[in-house]
Image (cartoon, rainbow, N blue to C red):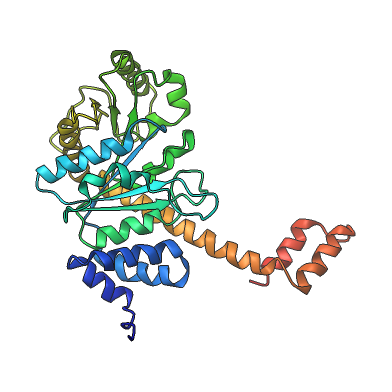
């Protein structure tokens, strides 16, 4: 039996926008593979994106992020909203693939047409985000998903990278999480739009809230707040006031507090649109991505320059100390 002709990224996107989940999966797989195919997908999806609200969920391993995301998806569905989840899973050391633990925890939504869950591998990327994750978010956006949740793998201090890929960043902590000094070292104050104390039915939840409130108070006295301001600040006739990261207590396994979290996300979206912060963050993301692409392309060209007779000759000159490394590099770069 003859195989059906392969569809172009534009054709796959049209099908995905019409509800074809297989077409959407193929687009995401193409993005994960990278190369020319991923570039074609990027060209197809870029003009039709920009409508989705992206939410980054970050926090330490074991904080209950996947269970919380599953509960949040349920709350969104009860509100009549459709939601896609991009779950960044640890890579297998043997195959490089994702472990898919998030899909296991979110299995209750598997048959819901208003939910799409995709796991992606970190592929060893220290920030907890695959380099292809931003492109995958754009695919889901272009396919018409109004809410896209990006859940990170939970790798610790370097995980703050998620903030650069989301309109709203949720930091999940547990009772007994550690002191405020460690939290500031991890960069939580700089990235959090919302704090969630998950497993709030455990002892120490009140202490954790107090620590977070102290951190927020210290940040208020610290000068530049990156769009956030002191508690109790209010808007003016010209627009809304600064956003103060609220603290929401949840018990994801029972659903306690999840409705409050969903309402907080909706309020932050409204604030971001009214204040112009959403546009500013998206502009920064576009600039950062353009920079990454340029760096990646230059690295490819530099790798090509790092071999061959010309390179070997310059290397020998450096070894013999007839040429310094910087001058040798200048000669190589002149070949670009």
Quadrant for the N terminus in the image: bottom left
Residue 221 or residue 44, whichever sits in front: 44
Q: How many marks?
A: 0
Give the quarter of the image for residue 251. Answer: top left
The x and y percentages for residue 12 are 28, 72
Residue 309 visible within the image? yes
The x and y percentages for residue 327 are 76, 60
Q: Which residue is rendered at x = 85% and y = 63% of the image?
A: 317
Q: Which residue is rendered at x = 72% and y = 61% of the image?
A: 329
Give the quarter of the image for residue 163. Answer: top left
Q: Is 240 rendered above or below residue 137?
A: above
Q: Which residue lies furthest to the front in this view?
A: 1
The x and y percentages for residue 127 are 47, 43
The x and y percentages for residue 95 are 51, 55
> For this view, does 267 lie left or right of residue 308?
left
Residue 150 visible within the image? no
């Amino acid at each position: 039996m003859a195989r059906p002709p392969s569809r172009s990224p534009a054709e796959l996107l049209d099908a995905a926008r019409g509800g074809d989940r297989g077409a959407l999966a193929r687009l995401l797989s193409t993005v994960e593979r990278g190369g020319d195919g991923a570039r074609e997908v990027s060209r197809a999806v870029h003009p039709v994106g920009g409508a989705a609200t992206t939410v980054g969920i970050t926090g330490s391993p074991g904080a209950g992020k996947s269970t919380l995301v599953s509960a949040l998806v349920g709350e969104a569905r009860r509100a009549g909203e459709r939601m896609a989840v991009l779950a960044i899973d640890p890579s297998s050391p043997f195959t490089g693939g994702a472990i898919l633990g998030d899909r296991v925890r979110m299995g209750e939504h598997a048959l819901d047409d208003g939910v799409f869950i995709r796991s992606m591998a970190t592929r060893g990327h220290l920030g907890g985000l695959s380099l292809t994750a931003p492109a995958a978010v754009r695919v889901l956006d272009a396919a018409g998903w109004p809410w896209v949740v990006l859940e990170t793998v939970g790798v610790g201090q370097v995980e703050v990278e998620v903030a650069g890929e989301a309109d709203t960043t949720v930091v999940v902590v547990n009772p007994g999480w550690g002191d405020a000094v460690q939290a500031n070292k991890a960069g939580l104050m700089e990235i959090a739009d919302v704090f969630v104390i998950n497993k709030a039915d455990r002892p120490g939840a009140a202490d954790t809230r107090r620590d977070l409130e102290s951190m927020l108070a210290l940040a208020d006295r610290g000068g530049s707040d990156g769009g956030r301001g002191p508690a109790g600040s209010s808007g003016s006739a010209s627009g809304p006031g600064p956003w103060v990261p609220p603290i929401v207590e949840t018990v994801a396994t029972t659903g306690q507090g999840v409705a409050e979290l969903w309402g907080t996300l909706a309020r932050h979206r409204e604030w971001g649109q009214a204040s112009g912060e959403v546009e500013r963050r998206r502009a920064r993301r576009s600039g950062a991505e353009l920079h990454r692409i340029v760096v990646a392309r230059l690295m490819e060209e530099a790798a090509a320059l790092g071999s061959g007779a010309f390179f070997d000759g310059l290397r020998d000159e450096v070894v013999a100390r007839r040429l310094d490394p910087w001058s040798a590099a200048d000669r190589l770069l002149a070949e670009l």
